Amino acid sequence: MVGNQHTIRREIEGLRAVAVVAVILFHFGVSWLPGGFLGVDVFFVISGFLITSNVLRDMHGERFSFRGFYLRRFLRLFPALATTALATLAVSFALLPPDEVLDLAQSAVAAIFAVSNIYFWSKVGYFDTAAHLKPLLHTWSLGVEEQFYLFWPAALLFTLRYFGVKVSAWIVGFAGVASLVAAQTVIGNSPSTVFYWMPFRIFEFALGIMIAIPWFKVRLTGALANMVGWFGLASIVGAFLLLRDNVPMPSAWSLIACAGAAVVILVGNVPPIAPLLSNVAMTFIGRISYSLYLVHWPVAVFMPLGTSLEKALALAVCLGLAALQFYAVEHPLRRGTRSVDLTTTPKALGVAASIIGATFAMSGYAAYSDGLRFRLPPELRNIQSANTMWNERNPTVRVGTCFILPDQTFKDFDQAECLDLKPGRKNVLLVGDSIAADMYSVLKQAYPDVNFLEATSGSCVPLAGNKMDTNCEALMRFIFDDFAGREGLDAVVLSASWHPSDVDPGIRESIDALAGKVDRIVLLGPPIRFTENVPDLIFASRAVTIAAVEQFVFAHRHPADEMTKPILEMYAKRAETISIEDVMCRGRCRLFDDEGNLIFLDFAHLTKAGATYLAGNMKAAYPNLF
């Protein structure tokens, strides 16, 4: 990205500064910059331009070599990346629970192998760990960029040699349009694929490439260049200020910021732009922008960002860490490698290999020690990993078949299996969200003689007319308008992670819609919920006894639990109501069953053992419910 000093364009360094600051402010939760995430897209445009310019310059000087190109890329990117990963792992050993340490170690290895975008794409799902618990999540963009570097120099040389400059530019333009069309086509069905995979980002790189390839001779100067430069800068800032993260990206909307960046690069350091982008502060931030990008997300994960003061402090920490990493690692290792000086390159490679080797060693130790599980008290070390518990739980609630995932459609709901009314048996339909899916497993174990049917979908509160998303809307419309009146259906159970906003008129209208169609309506109260995932709270407690752990964890109950209790009281006369909290906490509220198995998987969902535990309590409390 950076050549010799005389080739550096100060306005591009300033543009880097604009992009990285926008990304940081967005990730720090600054409300007035909702589109700051587009800073990453601006980086892709800059990379397309700089890489192509550097390759073309070396070709014209007859000094280009693939060995030199990839060596410079390696020393430019990977030592700083490995340093960030190494430091993040070290901090995680003290602060993160075992499961998150394991996930971090895996992501660190994926980042070093330039496949972190594919790694994080493979983890996307309804039950995936929240983004704020993934300290290296931001390295997905580096994976995209590094994969672009793998093929582009060879593709550029090939097209120039056999097709010439103008045809090469047309090929790049066609590839960019094809990439954008593909992104627009696929994003509706698989937004995560479009977001993480490099081919859907080619149109952003292509904008920078088209400027670098000398296929046109028109050069903007004077007032026209000034006006175009202002327009480009305004497009970038406008996209940052106006677009929001609920707009699927990358898409045609990305062009607002990306085209603006391309225009700024095209016109160069014209007078209106120079004071804004080429001043000392902006060029300094631009120079350290790579290290600044690397360190900002781990800082966002580990530091509090609730107040303006905390955000300002975190930003200062980012600048300090980035400057330290730039001058200690990034700058020394890439200095002098422009011409691949073999007197200095072996030393640089040795240092880089040492840092990367240390990262692999620390990641391996994290895996070997099962996320440093020895940090837990002996009584708690047998808690299974989150992945193991999810893999045990999900088949019991028929995930993907009777519980519709966000990346599925209503057509994937298997009516034949999930809504099979069996003559001669009691048929009870359970409707709701992922908590209702848990209750399906609970009720099926508690009342084995009953035929339980299941119609559940992610975050789908069982309210008539619920339009939370297309899956939920289609499922609720089918259940309330069609299936609820089927002959042979004895009861409908409504279950969800209820919130106060669901109380009225939502539940009332749902009961009205079912009245007259089914003989019995059972309303299950909300589950026991916590402010954080229970395994994380267990680790945060630093307690050494089960009693102390339970006391700490149950002190972190979610406030919505108390606010939703009136749900049961309000509708007790219109439906049979059951308090899940009362059933779960018969005698006392517990985190572990009699065999020591954890009951709660995350903030509310039950483990397989937890569902069995609740089933036993349910049968004891309501032996003749069905």
Image (cartoon, rainbow, N blue to C red):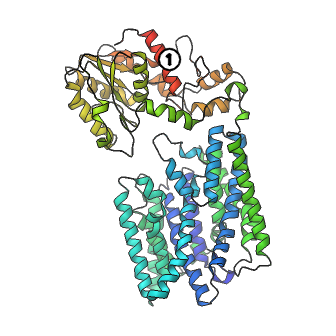
Residue 68's quadrant in the figure?
bottom right
**Res. 518 visible in picture:** yes
Q: How many marks?
A: 1
Residue 215 appearing in the image:
no
Q: Where residue 170 appears, x then y in whole percent?
A: 40, 81
621 or 214: nearer the eye?
Answer: 621
**Taking 496 as reference, is 204 above or below it?**
below
188 w.r.t. 51: above or below = above
Residue at the spot x=53%, y=31% of the render? 603
Q: Quadrant of the C terminus?
A: top left
* Residue at x-position 67% and y-position 50%: 313
Q: Nearer the viewer, residue 199 or 53?
A: 199
Quarter of the image for the N terminus: give it. bottom right
Q: Quadrant of residue 419?
A: top left
Q: Secondary structure at mark 1?
A: helix
Residue 520 locus on image (x, y percent): 27, 16
The residue located at (75%, 61%) in the rendering is: 324
Residue 62 pos. (x, y %) = 62, 89
Image position, residue 531 (x, y; %): 55, 32
Instruction: Answer few, some or many: residues within 10 Å of disc 1's Cα (few below 14, many 20 plus, some between 14 and 19).
Output: many
**Which residue does the numbered mark 1 point to in the structure image?**
584
Q: Looking at the picture, which amino acid does disc 1 mark?
A: Met
Q: Is residue 198 above or below residue 528?
A: below
Q: Is residue 382 left or right of residue 270?
A: right
Residue at image coords 72%, 77%: 337
